[in-house]
Structure formats: C-alpha cells, structure tokens
Image (tube, grey):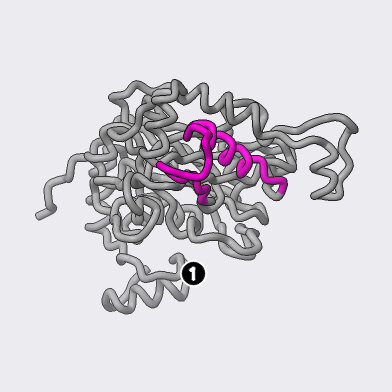
Amino acid sequence: MQAADEAAAQDALQEHGLTDGLPVVVPTPARVEQLIQAGGLDAEFVLGEIGPRLGVATIEKVAINAVMAGCLPEHFPVVIAAVRAVTRPEFDLTELQATTHNVAPLIIVNGPARIDCGPIASGVGALGAGFRANATIGRALRLCLLNLGGARPGVGDMAIMGQPGKFSYCLAEAEEHSPFPPLHTTRGCAAEDSAVTVVGAEAPHSVLVAIGTTHSDLPFADRWLRTVSAALASPASNNSQHEAGTVTVVLNPAHAQPMAEAGYTREQLQAELFSRTWRTAEELAYYTGATYPPGSRFNVVKEPADILLLVAGDSGNYTYLMPSAGPLGSHFNRPVTQRLVDQTCELPAPSV
C-alpha cells in the first residue's frame, strides 16, 4: 500500500478496514523491520494459521499489526508468544472467534518478560487505561485476529454485542504480591521462564468480599469461598448451563494473602471451589427451561484444574471472575501456555 504521507496512510488503512476503528501507527518498512529484529525470528517464519479465515501468521505480518497497535520492539516477543498460543489446536481459535458469545482471548504474562518486555502492569487498573505495554500487546493480538483471521463484526466475529476486551485484553500476574507459585509454573514452565497463558474470557465480573470488620462472624476464608462459589455457579453463565469450559478467577493480593494464611494452596482453592459450584437438574431446569436427567447435578466446569486462578490487581474488596463460552458445539476452547523461546526482549540498535 502506497500513500503520500502518514495522514493519507491513516485514511487508507481505515478505508480498507484494516484497523480496530481507532487510529493506528503507520507500519512503515523501517518500523516493521525494527520489530522483526526484536522478535529474533526470520520475517517469513510461520507462527500458525489464524481462523476463521486461516490467514498465515508470519513474523512479518504479525509485526505489521504490532506496529499498527503501537507496540515497542521490547513488546514484540510477548505478541509472538500470544499468537503462537492462540494458533495451537487446543485453543480452538476459529470457534472462539465465530461464536455469538462475547468471549475474547485474555493474555496473562508471567516470568521476567513482565519487566523486560514491558513493564506489563499487574497491579492497580491493570486491565484499564494508562499502560502502554498492556494496551498495545493486547491490541496487537486483536489486530492479527481481525486482519489475518478475518474476525470482523458480523462476518468472522458473530458476537451479538462484543465487549471492551475485543480491543485489548492483557495483564501480568502480580507474582511479587502473590502467596502462590506463579501461574505458569503450574502449567509446565519453570519460574525463571517467561510465558504467556491465553484463555477465552468474558469481561471481568466483580465479586465483593469485604475485608476487615463485617456483620458476619464467619472467617474471611469461609466468606470468600461462599461468595465466589455462588457467583461462579450462576445459572446464567455458559459454563453452568454446559458444565464445561474454563473459568478464570483473579484474586487481588488482599484476598489471596488471607486465603493462603488460612492454609489454602492454589490447588486446594481450585478443589474447594469446584466442590461448591454445582446446580441440581431441577435448579437448571427452572432457570433454563431445558430437560436434565432427574436427580443429577452439574458442575460449572469438568474438573478443578478448569478453574484458572491467579493474583493481580490492587489490594481491595474484589475478586474478579471471567467465565468463558463453555463448549462451542463439539469444540472446547482450552487455555494455552506458551513459553517465550528463541526470542529477545532487547531493543535493537537504531537503523542508520
């Protein structure tokens, strides 16, 4: 594409439907080359195919979208890992893109890349405005889904409403403020590895569990488990009605610490929540009008490990839940963790 100047290039990109509706950084050859160098892989290296259009995600094409998103070179290795993750078969990207549900890929960053490739925010407002790395890394993936995957609203993306996470959806785990091992260490990585975990997720649902003095005599851990499990088991969610998929649970540090002090590990919290998040056939029939085997009961997910649990955000009274689309027909969108391999977060030398 040729343009007389950057203003004309902006107009052309908008007219050709190559943006997310917001202004972009014009992907000049020099800007794209700088990101390719930062990625540490050849420009023609293929990361995978992005559904539903099955566009081929080469390093160069991903770099073009990352430049448009506003990424700096040090952000690019995280973008590469995220693209690798969503193109893995078990993530089932085509089904996630095409569903009428409002699910979007949430990028969770662990390990040294949280600092070296950012910094990527994990604390106050991490999913909000004001953090360039979070905003541009998440946006780069979204532009790849739009421009390589063809997921335009009403065409490849059939979500009836959509959600803000379809602009950008990225945060780091607050490892320094978590009493639990980092998320990626529970998914096949070493603590010193840098990794992204990508999971299909709705927008965050806030769950209020007040810290400190309340009218209840129950210990905080009991109140947290009761309240969060009740929210997870909402009969209105896809997970409850289909008994499958993944639910992401994000504890803020002031919720995570007392749960650990009460003796709970991450795995024990997953198991305890799993044991509490079920509905009887009669309850589901009452809410949904569907028919279920009499006397049976249904859990919100298939097993405790399907509750993805991490620590992020500022200290306060809220835990956040992100349900998923559940099963998409015969398909299941599963979280994928991808290590940053053969890549560098070093800023390349300026071209002369």
Q: Is 28 left or right of 310, judged from the image as shown?
A: left
Instruction: Identify the residue shown where x is 46% and y is 40%.
Output: 250
Query: What residue is at 89 percent from the left and 33 percent from the top?
Result: 293
Examine the structure image and report whether residue 104 is included in the region drawn in magenta.
no
Viewer-nearest residue: 263 or 185: 263
Q: Nearer the viewer, residue 327 or 126?
A: 126
Q: Quadrant of the C terminus?
A: bottom left
Q: Position of residue 125 (x, y in %)?
A: 35, 54
In the rendered structure, which segment of residues is drawn in magenta? 206-235
Q: Which residue is mark 1?
A: 17
Quick check: 67 left or right of 216?
left
Q: Residue 343 falls in which quadrant of the image?
A: top left
Residue type, numbered disc 1: Gly
Q: Position of residue 32 (x, y in %)?
A: 28, 55
In the rendering, at what x and y percent does residue 108 appear? Answer: 41, 40
Name the residue at 49% across, 60% down.
164
Q: Is residue 53 above or below residue 333?
A: below
> Residue at the left extreme?
352
In which quarter of the view is residue 42 placed? top left
The answer to whether residue 79 shows anywhere in this view is no
Depth check, front residue: 96 or 127: 127
Query: Disc 1 on helix, strand or loop?
Result: loop
295 vs 45, nearest the viewer? 295
Q: Is residue 232 magenta?
A: yes
